[in-house]
Image: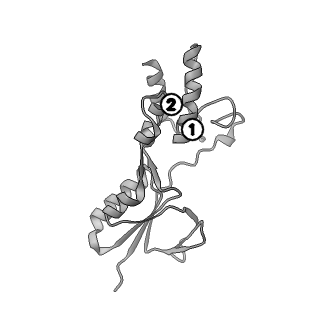
Amino acid sequence: MAKPHIVILGAGLGGAIAAFEVKDAAGEKAEVSVVSQSDTFHFVPSNPWVAVHWRKRDAIEVKLPPVFKKRGIAFTGVGAKTVSPAKNQLELNDGNIIDYDYLVIATGPDLAFDEIPGLGPYGGFTQSVCHIDHAETAAAAFDKFVENPGPIVVGAVQGASCFGPAYEFAMILDT
C-alpha cells in the first residue's frame, strides 16, 4: 500500500512551519511535499528592519530546496495554478499535476493594494513592508525621509493589508 501524500501549498511562515511539523508528526508513514511559487523563503517579520537598513535582504532569506531535502520533504518552486479538490490534485503553473491525499493551504495574504487608488508601493503615494521587494523600495523612501524629516503617517488599510508590520514600523521610526 502506498504512503499517503500530504502536500503543503505555500512556503512562507505558515507553510514552511506546517511542512516541518507535518513531517515530524508523520515521519516515514507519509510523503510530504511543499509547493511554492518561489524557491526562496523570506522571514517576513524582518521586512520592517530591511526598510530602515537594520537588515539586508540576504540576511532574511533562505533557499528552500536544500532545507526541505535535509528533512526528507519534497519541494517544487513553480507555484500552483489550480486546486481540484474533487480529484485531489494540484495543477502547477508549468502544467504538471501533483496528486495528494491531504492538502494544507498556507498561501499567506493576498495584498489588495488595488482596492484604494494610490495605495501600495506601486501606487505612488505609500510604501509597504509586507514583502521583501516592497521593504527594499521603502528603504529608498526612508532614506529620502531621513534627509528631510517631518511628519509621517504609518498605517494599514482594512481588507487590503496586514496590521502587525505597521505597528512595528511605527515603533522602529520612533526609535
Quadrant the C terminus occupies? top left
N-terminal of the two: label 2 or label 1? 2
Answer whether residue 43 is visible to the viewer in this image. Answer: yes
Quadrant the N terminus occupies? bottom left
Q: Which residue lies furthest to the right in this view?
A: 117
Say which residue appears at 70% left-offset and 33% top-offset.
Answer: 118
Q: Mark 2 points at which residue?
A: 51
Q: Is 164 placed left or right of 125 in the picture?
A: left
Point out residue 76 in the picture as x, y percentages from the top left corner.
48, 65
Say which residue appears at 56% left-offset and 31% top-offset.
Answer: 138
Point out residue 147 in the picture as x, y percentages from the top left corner.
57, 15
Q: Which of 120 and 139 is in front in this view?
A: 139
Point out residue 145 in the picture as x, y percentages from the top left corner.
58, 19
**10 Å crowding of disc 2: few (<14), some (14-19), many (20+):** many
Q: Is 28 placed left or right of 139 in the picture?
A: left
- The quarter of the picture where residue 45 lies is top left
Q: Mark 1 points at which residue?
A: 134
Secondary element at image label 1: helix
Say which residue appears at 46% left-offset and 39% top-offset.
Answer: 57
Amino acid of disc 2: Ala
Compared with 16, 95 (above or below) is below
- The quarter of the picture where residue 172 lies is top left
Compared with 5, 123 (above or below) is above
Q: Is 61 placed left or right of 160 in the picture?
A: left
Give the Cα distance between marks 2 and 1: 8 Å
